[in-house]
């Protein structure tokens, strides 16, 4: 198989603009990745793409540049179930990053405990066909039952058209379930149409389901603004994200998705992505919940007056 690197990728993400929006103190970028460096942390043989290296140092520099304080680093599919790059990032974070890992059913209890000790608080199940080969649901359920007693949660990534088929599986999971990128709605469809209503219903009927209101750059058809100083990017995604933030203010998270793997049309400016936040969370209270209270409750409960409870 031939792997392609996206031309110009590094140039773009090395130079994001400074956002106009000031994140509240303690803000968490709750969805980002580290890639490699490939020489130290090789990419998985079963990967569907090969990214450019994106190191923990670059990630933490971006965090500071954007005015954020913490990260949740999510295991990317190009690293498969080899979590060494993720662990390295968590170890280098001074406790300011938590992680979401990928594991197989062969993972030992000792390995789970070691991941927990370094800051992993969840596992990711991926159902996006261009990114992974299918993992049998019985294996995923077995993993879910193993991680629940640790107080971890499950992050799921899927396309909106696949939600009806995945519904029973998701609603049987025994932990908090965090959906990546709003379940990837088709934003050319109405925000109150049947497809997005099904996702809203999932969250309404299942209080253990959370959503990341992230990745407008992946979902948008209108795209980023022309290079004319306009900072209100990805407007067609706003109604979807805003509906979730306003309806479920205590169960939404936000992240940059840096370094934006697999984006071919354009590379997003992370500063512009931060300036998307006040459009989807228009009040200071909603912004604080989205960027501080919710991620702290899920990833640093010991610092926000809670404890980790088995079952996530
Ligand atoms: O849409 C994507 O291509 C994508 C890929 C990955 C990954 O490879 O893990 O993660 C994401 O959050 C999004």
Image: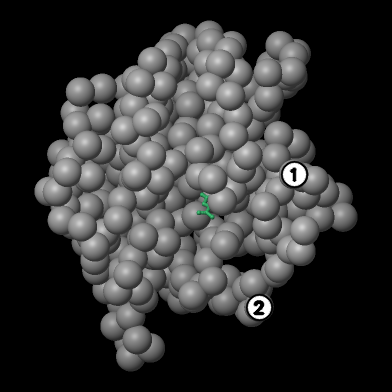
Q: Which residue is mark 1?
A: 46
Secondary structure at badge 2 equals loop
Work out how far the residue at label 1 is from the one at label 2, CA to CA, in angstroms: 22 Å
Residue at (57% x, 42% y) in the render: 74
Number of dots carrying numbers: 2
Q: In the rendered image of this protein, does residue 193 appear above or below residue 305?
A: below
Residue at (67% x, 52% y) in the render: 48
Secondary structure at badge 1 equals loop
Q: Which residue is mark 2?
A: 7
Q: Nearer the viewer, residue 285 or 197?
A: 197
> Residue 194 in the image: x percent, y percent?
17, 43
Can the viewer see residue 269 in this picture? yes
User: Which of the two discs, 1 and 2, labels the residue nearer the N terminus?
Assistant: 2
Choose mark 1 or mark 2, whichever is in front.
1
Residue at (36% x, 60% y) in the render: 219
For label 1, the crowd category at 10 Å Cα-Cα, with few meaning under 14, some 14 to 19 and many 20 or more, is few
Name the side, left or right, on which 234 lies relative to 29: left
**Which of the image's four quarters has the C terminus?**
top left
Q: Nearer the viewer, residue 133 or 204?
A: 133
Can the viewer see residue 176 in this picture? no
Check residue 239 in the rendering and tell me which mark sits there, or answer none.
Answer: none
> Residue 71 in the image: x percent, y percent?
52, 45
For label 2, the crowd category at 10 Å Cα-Cα, with few meaning under 14, some 14 to 19 and many 20 or more, is few
């Amino acid at each position: 198989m031939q792997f392609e690197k996206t031309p110009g990728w590094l140039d773009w993400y090395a130079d994001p603009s400074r956002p106009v929006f000031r994140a509240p103190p303690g803000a968490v970028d709750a969805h980002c990745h580290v890639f490699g460096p490939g020489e130290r942390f090789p990419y998985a043989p079963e990967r569907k793409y090969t990214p450019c290296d994106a190191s923990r140092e670059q990630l933490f520099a971006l965090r500071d540049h954007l005015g954020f304080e913490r990260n949740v680093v999510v295991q990317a599919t190009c690293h498969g179930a080899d979590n060494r790059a993720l662990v390295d990032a968590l170890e280098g974070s001074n406790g300011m990053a938590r992680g979401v890992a990928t594991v197989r059913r062969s993972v030992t209890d000792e390995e789970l405990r070691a991941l927990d000790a370094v800051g992993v608080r969840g596992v990711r199940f991926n159902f996006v066909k261009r990114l992974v080969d299918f993992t049998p649901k019985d294996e995923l359920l077995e993993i879910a039952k193993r991680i629940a007693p640790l107080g971890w949660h499950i992050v799921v990534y899927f396309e909106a058209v696949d939600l009806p088929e995945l519904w029973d599986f998701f609603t049987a999971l025994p932990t908090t379930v965090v959906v990546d990128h709003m379940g990837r709605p088709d934003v050319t469809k109405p925000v109150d149409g049947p497809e997005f209503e099904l996702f809203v219903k999932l969250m309404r009927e299942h209080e253990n389901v959370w959503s990341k209101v992230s990745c407008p750059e992946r979902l948008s058809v209108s795209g980023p603004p022309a290079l004319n100083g306009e900072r209100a990017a990805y407007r067609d995604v706003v109604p979807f994200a805003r509906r979730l933030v306003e309806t479920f203010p205590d169960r939404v998270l936000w992240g940059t998705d840096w370094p934006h793997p697999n984006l071919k049309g354009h590379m997003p400016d992370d500063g512009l992505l931060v300036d998307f936040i006040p459009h989807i969370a228009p009040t200071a209270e909603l912004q604080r919940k989205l960027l501080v209270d919710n991620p702290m409750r899920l990833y640093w409960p010991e610092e926000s007056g809670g404890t980790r409870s088995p079952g996530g």
